[in-house]
Image (cartoon, rainbow, N blue to C red):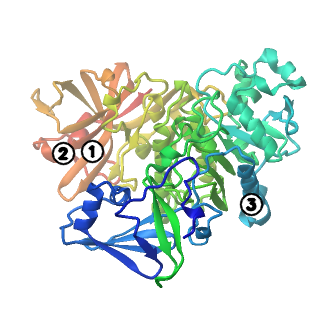
Amino acid sequence: MDRSSIADVPGGATPHLCQYCENIIFTLSNSISFTYRKFDQARKDGCRFFQIILEKHPIADCDEGGYIDFHWVDGAIKLFYSHDHGIHASPLFVQKDSPASVHFKIRPLNPFPGSKESFDLIRGWIHRCDERHTRCKKLRTALSWQGPTRLIDVGNVGSKNVCVCFTVLENAVQYAALSYCWGGEQESKTVSARLEERRKGFPLAELSETIQDAVITTRRLGLRYLWVDAICIIQDDEADGERERSRMDQIYSGASITIVAARARMAADGFLQHRDVIKFYGTVCRVKYRRSSEGNGEVGSGFLSANGLDITYDDPIDLRGWTFQERHRSFRTLRFGSKQTVWECPGDLCVDGGENFVNKSSSEGLFTGTVTDLSYPYHLDDPRNKDELGYVLKAWQDLVQEYSERTLSQRTDRLPAFAAMAKAFGTFLQLEPEQYLAGLWAFDICMQLRWRRPDHVLGDGWCNERHGPTWSWASLDGPIAFDHPRLRMGVDTLKLVKDECQIGWKSPDFKYGEVEFARLTVYGFLCRSIWREENFIGRRHGTQHSIVLPLKAHWDCYEERAPEVWCLEINRNTSGERQTSYGILLAKPVGNIYKRLGYFEFYHNELKPEQIKAGVDIQGLPLNSNWFDNGGYKKICIE
């Protein structure tokens, strides 16, 4: 038996082996079968091997006469269940110096991310990208360089000092950028009074642990310069901050490498310290195998963990708003996570341990929000490609939804922290920045306005103070969801009066950033209702008779609910005999100015028929088609 392969797993995890599993030996060509009764008995008696298998792949509706087959294929145990014919893979891992490493490609998790061996591995990944990845070279050449105003000169390995230097925009330099969580105020940040001192040089020890680790990493990767927002942006100079934040897209895409301090909750934590990998394994079982089915073949061992060892994006950094665009817009990332170190470039994905696999959360397609996106290949107004455009816009909305689940320290950062993504989307579709209206795209306004709070969010205690135009998803903290399906159905009845819309940007030269005021002017069918005792009450046309409206409301926040609610129809859709209207709920504080309260669906088939006055002739819309026609087609302003 291979004795080296049964040593304890790095990090201190002790493999399980008991009477039920110690005599199980897998071979390449044969399967092992168990009745479900025996399988369940071993689980109940505490065999962690069988418990792990059932935890990973719960078996439902299997009678006691059923059976489970185990196969060893491509370095993994694959289960075949007799009752559903399903195939469920559980990869095994072994240490790299074990003879079993020939058959099993997955390695144990690495508890020492800052070790010499770890950085030797990382430099190998970078060298392979630099020398062999033709696609990466082409993309790098195609990226325009507009670097940051300042960089940290990290000096030589072992140096106790660093300095802040100004860049020369005409000369592209290689630098690393840091993506990390501030986690509160940073004492080491650069302010106006410190700038001259920092240009002359200052002690590395003045910086927080995370930034110190980033300096060390930059040095060990052979780079001279590092960009860190807290040090390279003058934090008490608003104009400097606005200018540098407007360059975030170029800063991260232009970096040779983005160092991602994923595991650090705050700047004081650092990211090169030892990892506690035991908690990521859960229980570990030793699994025996034999290459040949011959009885005298050599027996080796691999390990099976209760928890999956694939790449997951569930570190502290994955909860923060600013880091969303930093990850998407970076050309190459080196992520120091709680579980793994992950290298990602357009041509490769590598890990220092565990499984080299990740489930993508964002939409895959023509637009991904990354630097690898090419320009949209069709004309926006070509009806032959409306489906492709629909998929692109759905990808945008998926990214907005994913971003909206992240948190920000400053509420006013909701748009600035997503500005690089918006700029990338505008560039992708070749749109002018003026098309971007505080988080919404003007050419698609009817679908862009159809966002709402997910049903579970209102009770989660999100802060509901508005900070921006009420019609934008960016005005509220917390998750939002767009109305789907994304592909257009029915007839849009709302029309944007683009020339009369008003947007006041905090920085007029950067129209993807923070707005100080914004107003939409639209034409639409508008009806008044009264919200009382959880119902919406309307009037029959030409009478004073009250009716309960078949309207389902999705409030933006409970605190804003008002007794008088105006319903603005955006779209109406007929499916068979069923007709539904979709729109937004509004309050009318003063004059002809409205504010958004929420989103609604109106089910016309549940409303008793009534006489409807002459409708408005809109192309594609039947006259006198629903209750909203009674309110008339009006021009209003929404703030």
- Identity of the residue furthest to the bottom in this view: 294
Residue 416 in the image: state x and y as whole percent. Answer: 59, 33
Query: Can you identify the residue that label 2 sits on?
Result: 604
- At 66% from the left and 29% from the top, the residue drawn is 508
Residue 137 visible to the viewer: no
Residue 440 in the image: state x and y as whole percent. Answer: 50, 40
Query: Can you identify the residue that label 1 sits on?
Result: 581
Q: What secondary structure is found at the residue carrying circle 3?
A: helix
Given contact means CB atoms under 8 Å apart, are the residues at marks 1 and 2 in contact? yes
At label 2, which amino acid type do we have? His
Looking at the image, residue 244 lies above or below residue 191: below
Q: Quadrant of residue 433?
A: top right
- At 57% from the left and 47% from the top, the residue drawn is 11
Classify the position of the C terminus by image quarter.
top left
At label 3, which amino acid type do we have? Cys
- Image-based side of 37 in relation to 172, left or right: left
Q: Quadrant of residue 218?
A: top right
Q: CA distance from mark 2 to mark 3?
A: 59 Å
* Mark 1 nearby-residue class (10 Å; few <14, some 14–19, many ≥20): many
Query: Can you identify the residue that label 3 sits on?
Result: 129
- In the rendered structure, which disc, 1 or 2, sits on the residue that comes first in sequence? 1
- At 34% from the left and 60% from the top, the residue drawn is 50
Given contact means CB atoms under 8 Å apart, are the residues at marks 3 and 1 in contact? no
Q: CA distance from mark 1 to mark 2?
A: 8 Å
- Image-based side of 209 in relation to 194, left or right: left
Given contact means CB atoms under 8 Å apart, are the residues at marks 2 and 3 in contact? no
- In the rendered structure, which disc, 2 or 3, sits on the residue that comes first in sequence? 3
Q: Quadrant of residue 410?
A: top right
At label 1, which amino acid type do we have? Ser
* Closer to us: 172 or 415: 172
Residue 145 visible to the viewer: yes
- In the rendered structure, which disc, 3 or 1, sits on the residue that comes first in sequence? 3
